Amino acid sequence: MKRQISRRGFVKSSLMVTAAVPLGIRGQTEPVSQAPPPKSATPTSAPAAVSSEKMPMGKIGDQEFSRLMLGGNLIGGWSHSRDLAYVSALMRHYNTDAKIRETLEVAEANGINVINTWVMQENSHLFDHWKRGGKMKWIAQVRLDAEGGYSQIRKAIDEGAAGIHLTGDAAESLLRQEKFDKVGETIQLIKSKKRLAGVGAHDLRVIVECEQAKMAPDFYQKTFHSLDYYTAPRADEKDFLGAHDNSWCNDPQAVVDVMAKVTKPWIAFKILAAGAVQPRAAFPYAFNSGADFILVGMFDWQVEEDAKLARRVVSAVAAPGSKRTRPWFGSTPQPATVGQI
């Protein structure tokens, strides 16, 4: 298996070789038992400048969402950082109350209109953003109660989520326990409350099972990334989650093949392999491979450049002659004009 991308191979794999791209590590989800981040009374210094370039949008159900979605893991202090034990604490100390407010404002100013977070994490910053006039939509992750109840779904509904999805670990646990009918029950419950209903997955079998059972969620949220990074799993490591907190998609081609036959919007997440793959390689890889939306954890200083990159990549992938593997779901992005890419 290829361990490092050669200079020539990297350029070939990227549509955006000239784009300015943030190079920071992007931690993703693993809970940590740390002291809470320091509170900051310092307000955001100035309103975020609104970008003049429109972010490509797509529809899930009857709602429009930005093709680039904001992940909430960095804000919540959850990190996949391999064996670097300090990273989660560092993120929590960086993301003070003021910094989280700024991140939401900068994201919205750059055309990102949705954030995805777990319903049980601290979401008061989002609710405060709404009170100040912010329009950021919320897709809430939920799990079932220990006894199989739906209190987290009810909480997400009560707190204003536009969409709700079972987390990957929750769906995979039900699959292992041969209780997968519960997934269908959650979809119907969420839909009955006039919310968009989704299913998250690390294990591709979850989506295959949903499709075979015709459960008809409004969207899927599936991990997807290349294996072109140094800590990628070895060929003999077949688990759908990396044994060393190093992988969330052990067979990306299998994902491409399955999703090519799925007629529901696909939100691809973990596309950076938790910071191991650069955005200028990961964004085109995901969109060319059929993802309708990408969910990316971003610090405030990464948002503007990632938004610029997403706009360029979506325009390029939507242009005539694109090698995208499935149709776009929702409104079709407009291809870039000459000179924009």
Image (cartoon, helix red, strand yellow):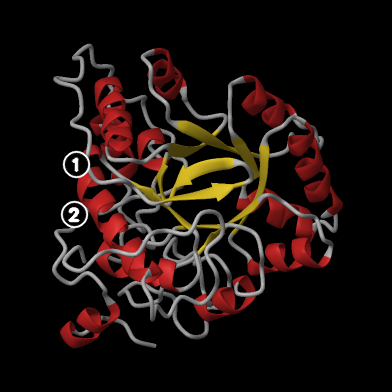
- Residue 282 visible, this orientation: no
Toward the viewer: 34 or 261? 261
| The N terminus sits in image quarter | bottom left
Image spot of residue 7 (x, y percent): 16, 83
Q: Label 1 belongs to which residue?
A: 301
Name the element at disc 1: helix
Q: Is residue 65 left or right of residue 329?
A: left
| The C terminus sits in image quarter | bottom left
Image quadrant assignment for residue 70: top left
Q: Is residue 111 above or below residue 291?
A: above
Q: Is residue 182 left or right of residue 307?
A: right
Image quadrant assignment for residue 33: top left
Q: Earlier in the sequence, mark 2 or mark 1?
A: 2
Image quadrant assignment for residue 212: bottom right
**Amino acid type of disc 2?**
Pro
Q: Residues within 10 Å of mark 2 (few under 14, many from 20)?
A: some
Name the element at disc 2: loop
Q: Label 2 belongs to which residue?
A: 22
**Amino acid type of disc 1?**
Trp
Image spot of residue 294 (x, y percent): 43, 55
- Residue 175 numbered mark, or none: none
- Looking at this view, name the residue that lies furthest to the front: 337
Query: Going 30% across and 21% down the picture, which residue do you hit?
Result: 97
Query: Going 50% across and 59% down the picture, which residue do you hit?
Result: 292
Q: Is residue 252 above or below residue 341?
A: below
The reply to whether discs 2 and 1 touch (Cβ–Cβ < 8 Å) is: yes
Toward the viewer: 206 or 65? 65
Q: Is residue 136 left or right of residue 308?
A: right
- Residue 110 visible, this orientation: yes
